[in-house]
């Protein structure tokens, strides 16, 4: 392989280039939260995000999880720029490529654990029968010790 060839392993799973995030307060005031963040995370790496309260950890996680957009810079996920993607594209990325473990529960309160697990399958393009979706949901609950 010469120096111009790349492999999938050469592409970081996550790459942030000069990410900024500011929130609007009123009509004129911008409150900067993230400034010029650069980061690369490769597949298989373990990363811990630490910092004082108010330092931007949750804001960064919301950007990484495609829940929010940066106000500046570029966010690449698996080689594809997703930071400026539409809401629909980011929703698809969340459904297909990102898993979340939230600090607080984000479950539908009047729905069973199984139904909460199955629900994201309804948003994919896969045509799963209700029986197959239930089987997959039960397998996932079993994998995390909740069956």
Image: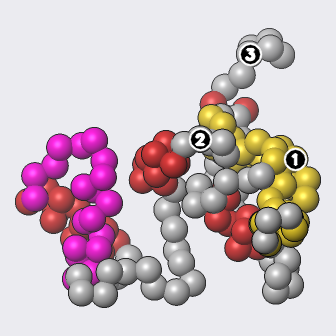
Instruction: State the residue position of label 2.
Output: 85
On-image quarter of the C terminus: bottom left
Decide: few, some or many residues near mark 2? Use Cα within 10 Å; few <14, some 14-19, many ≥20: some
Magenta-colored segment: predominant secondary structure: helix
Q: Nearer the viewer, mark 1 or mark 2?
A: 2
The residue sitting at 87% across, 67% down in the picture is: 29
Q: Is residue 106 visible?
A: yes
Picture quadrant of residue 112: bottom left
Q: Secondary structure at mark 2?
A: loop
The residue sitting at 66% across, 26% down in the picture is: 7
Q: Is residue 49 visible?
A: no
Q: Position of residue 86 (x, y in %)?
A: 54, 43
On-image quarter of the N terminus: top right
Q: Secondary structure at mark 1?
A: strand
Could you give the CA–CA distance between mark 1 and mark 2, rounded to whole angstroms? 17 Å
Q: Are marks 3 and 2 in contact (CB under 8 Å)?
A: no
Q: Is 37 within the magenta?
A: no
Picture quadrant of residue 49: bottom right
Q: Earlier in the sequence, mark 1 or mark 2?
A: 1
Decide: few, some or many residues near mark 1? Use Cα within 10 Å; few <14, some 14-19, many ≥20: some
Vertically, is 29 above or below 111? above
Instruction: State the residue position of label 1.
Output: 18
Could you give the CA–CA distance between mark 3 and mark 2, rounded to whole angstroms? 27 Å
Vertically, is 32 above or below 39? below
Could you give the CA–CA distance between mark 3 and mark 1, rounded to whole angstroms? 26 Å
Q: Earlier in the sequence, mark 3 or mark 2?
A: 3
Q: Secondary structure at mark 3?
A: loop
Give left or right: position of 17 versus 48.
Answer: right
The residue sitting at 83% across, 16% down in the picture is: 3
Give left or right: position of 132 versus 113.
Answer: left
Instruction: State the residue position of label 3.
Output: 5
Residue range corresponding to the magenta coloring: 112-130
């Amino acid at each position: 392989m010469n120096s111009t060839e790349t492999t999938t392993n050469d592409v970081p799973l996550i790459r942030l280039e000069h990410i900024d995030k500011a929130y609007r307060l009123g009509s004129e005031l911008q409150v900067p939260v993230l400034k010029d963040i650069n980061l690369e995370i490769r597949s298989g790496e373990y990363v811990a995000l630490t910092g004082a309260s108010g330092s931007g950890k949750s804001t960064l996680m919301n950007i990484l999880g495609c829940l929010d957009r940066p106000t500046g810079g570029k966010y690449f996920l698996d080689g594809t720029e997703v930071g400026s993607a539409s809401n629909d594209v980011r929703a698809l990325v969340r459904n297909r490529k990102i898993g979340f473990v939230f600090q607080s529960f984000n479950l539908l309160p009047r729905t069973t654990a199984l139904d909460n697990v199955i629900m994201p399958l309804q948003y994919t393009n896969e045509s799963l029968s209700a029986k197959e979706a239930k089987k997959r949901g039960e397998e996932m609950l079993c994998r995390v010790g909740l069956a």
